Amino acid sequence: MSHTERLPRTRTYLMCPPEHFTVEYAINPWMDTTVPVDPALALKQWQLLRETLTDLGHTVHVLQPRPELPDMVYAANGAFSVDGKVYGARFAYPQRAAEAAAHRHFYVSGSWEFTDPEHVNEGEGDFAYLPDAYGGLILAGYGFRTEPVAHTEAQEVLGRPVISLQLVDPAYYHLDTALAALDDRNVTYFPEAFSPASQRVLAQLFPEAVIADRADAEAFGLNLVSDGRHVVLNTEATAMGEKVRAAGYTPVHVELGELKRGGGSVKCAVAELRP
Ligand code: ARG
């Protein structure tokens, strides 16, 4: 099969090292507080992910981790930026609430137009941006963490149309566990993670989407970061890697087994900064 050449675009990301990563509470079905995590291994895997992104030519900013916030490694949840504007996060669970201020501090110290949210939303965990789809489209998930009213709020703050999608499977509690942007206009997703109506919306908007299956989702294969050509995804997601390759992208696998114990993988650990 031939495809138009998939062109990478240089990105800027924000990550937070898992220096204090543990699973000491369970707020999603993947978290098991009885199985200890290996903090040294988690850090090593995270460092390789960061190096993978910088080796691809991208810039990675690093947020200072805090000992009382073990989930801070999942930096995607801290905010959502589009066109230099930032819609801050407001976490659904009290255990993570204080992470929002750490992210806020990062943006207000830079040249970002930051807005504090009124409604519960978990940043890029539940928001994705496709700059070249329909002139610039935001996809937003609800059902487990982010409140649907936050989608309306995000649209007002960011001035881009927001498409609300209902997540229905608790294993795929954030949009970024079930759907990812492959480039500026195309996505990959696991249909069954969405309500039937939301599946129809996705099929209408993205006829070229790469369709993933349950095994891909279970391997956290949808929790990927793409620069438009290189698709960074965890090693467990081999079949997903082949699917994106068949669609003309280049899979780049990284081992992130420890972060999966907290219910996340590549995308959860990476927030994209869109100036
Ligand atoms: N333990 C974290 C939580 O349940 C994992 C967050 C994963 N992040 C993501 N962007 N999906 O909140």
Image (cartoon, rainbow, N blue to C red):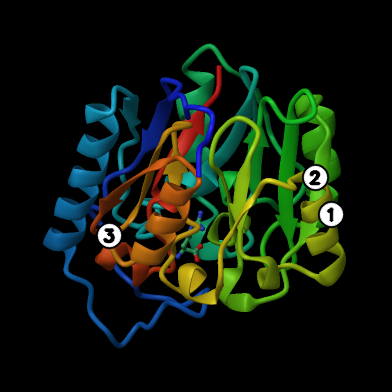
Asked whether, in this view, residue 184 is left or right of residue 154, the answer is left
Give the Cα separation between the discs numbered 3 and 2. Answer: 31 Å
Asked whether, in this view, residue 66 is left or right of residue 120, the answer is left
| Residue 227 at x, y percent in the picture | 44, 32
Disc 1, SS: helix
| Residue 234 at x, y percent in the picture | 32, 58
| Residue 45 at x, y percent in the picture | 20, 54
| Relative to 22, residue 25 above or below | below
Q: Which mark is residue 71?
A: none
Q: Tell me if residue 89 can be seen.
A: no
The residue at the point 21 percent across, 59 percent down is 42
Residue type at numbered disc 1: Val
- According to the picture, the residue beneath numbered tag 1 turns out to be 201
**Which of pointers 3 and 2 lies earlier in the amino acid sequence?**
2
Query: Would you say the residues marked 2 and 1 are in contact, meaning their CB atoms lie under 8 Å apart?
Result: yes
**Observer-nearest residue: 90 or 263?**
263
- According to the picture, the residue beneath numbered tag 2 turns out to be 205
Query: Would you say the residues marked 3 and 1 are in contact, meaning their CB atoms lie under 8 Å apart?
Result: no
Residue type at numbered disc 2: Leu
Disc 3, SS: loop
